Image (cartoon, rainbow, N blue to C red):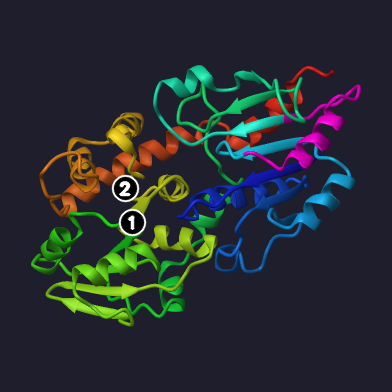
Amino acid sequence: MRWDIFCRVIDNHGDLGVCWRLARQLAARSESARLWVDDGRALAWMAPDGCAGVEVIDWSDAEAVEAAARAAPPDVLIEAFGCEPAPALIARHAEHARTPGFRGAWINLEYLSAEPYVERLHTLPSSVFRGPGAGLTKRFFYPGFSPRTGGLLREPALAARQAGFDRAAWLASQRIDWQGERLVSLFCYEPSRLAALLEQWAAGDAPVRLLVTAGRAAQAVRAALNLSAEASAATSGRLSIHFLPLLTQDDFDALLWSCDLNFVRGEDSLVRALWAGRPFVWQIYPQDDDAHHVKLNAFLDAVEAPPSQRAFHHAWNDTNDADPSAPDAATLDDWARAAQRAREAQQAQDDLLTQLMRFVDALPRP
C-alpha cells in the first residue's frame, strides 16, 4: 500500500526520528512510503544515505503539495502527533477513501506514554465533521508498553544487529581511545543537577568516560564545566569527557549498545535505550504544571524500575530537591537486570508497525 507520513519538527528532532524509523520499516516490508516534513534538515546527519523506498517531501513546497494532490493518493494517511496535513492532501486521500473496496485508513499516531488512558483510547475512532475530510473517520493509534496498546517501533533484525555488534571496533571508529573505563552516554536537555553529577564522577573511585552527544547535551556540559564551545574533550579528576559529532540513527544505536549507562531524552531515544537492554536514565520533556511527572512515574511502573533507579529519575527530572547519586557497580547491575527484564517483556509483544498494518487491514471496507 501507499503510506503518507506527516511530521512537523518542533525543536528536538524526536518527532522526525520516530517518523523516519517508521518510514524505513515500511520500506523494508516493500510498502511505499512518503515522508512529509516541514523541516527535514536533520535528515542530513540522521540518515545521510536516505532509504530506498522512502521519498522525503518538503511539506512547505507548494509545488510538491500540488503535484502530490494530482498523483496517486495514499492508502494510509498518518498524521504524526496530531499535526494537520495540507488540506489538498486530505482531500486527495478522502477521494480515494470513498471508493468501494478501499482498505486504507487515516491514522493519528500519538505520543508514547505508559499512562492508563492510553489503553482506553488506543484505536478509538474520531469522526471528521469539517474540512476536506468531512465524513471520514480518523483512528487514534497509541504506542505503549502493554498488550492493549500499539507497542513500540522495532525492526525485525534489531536483535541480530546487536548480537553481532563489535563494541571496540565501533568506539575506535569514533576515535574513542577506550581503556576499559566505565562508559556513559549523555543525550539530554539542560538538567539542573548535571554539574552535581559531573562532580561526583570526577571525585569518584572508578574512572568514567562520558560520551556527550552533539547539540544541547554538549552545550550543557560545556556550560557546567566552563569549557569553550570548541572543546572536543576534557578531563576532571576521574572523569574524562569526549564530545561526539552528530550521529546517524544507526550510530546512535551503537552508542547505546557500547555504554554501561545511557542517559536519554524524549521518546525515540527512550525506546532505543530500552531495546539496548543497558541501564538507562530518561529525561522526560517538561510540561506545564509538572504533568510530565505523572507520565514519568507511569513509565517507571511499566518497566518495574528498582527503587534506586526511580530515585535517580526523580532527582534528574527535578521532581524533588535531592541531587542524583552516581550509581556504583552494584547499582548498575541492578538497573541492568531491570532493563533486560523490560526488554524481554516488550520483545514478547508485536512491534508497532506489525500491529498497525494488522489494524489497518482489519478495518471495515466502504
Rendered image quadrant of residue 126: top right
Magenta residues span 84-105
Q: Is residue 75 above or below residue 318?
A: above
**Between 142 and 28, which is closer to the camera in this rendering?**
142
Horizontal side of residue 176 vs 247, given as left or right: left
Residue 180 at x, y percent in the picture: 27, 71
Alpha carbon separation for disc pair 1 and 2: 7 Å
The residue carrying mark 2 is: 283
**Residue placed most toward the observer, 30 or 61:** 61
Does any portion of residue 71 appear in the rendered image? no
The residue under label 2 is which amino acid type? Answer: Gln
- Residue at image position (68%, 63%) is 50
Q: Nearer the viewer, residue 185 or 116?
A: 116
Decide: few, some or many residues near mark 1? Use Cα within 10 Å; few <14, some 14-19, many ≥20: many
Q: Is residue 43 left or right of residue 300?
A: right
On-image quarter of the C terminus: top right
Residue 276 vs 168, above or below: the answer is above
Tag 1, which secondary structure?
loop
- Residue 298 drawn above or below residue 254: above
Which residue is tagged 1?
A: 188
Contact check, label 1 and label 2, Cβ < 8 Å = yes
Sequence-first tag of 1 and 2 = 1
What is the three-letter code of the residue carrying label 1? Answer: Cys
In the image, residue 16 lies at what x, y percent? 56, 52
- Residue 25 position, x and y percent, is 66, 48
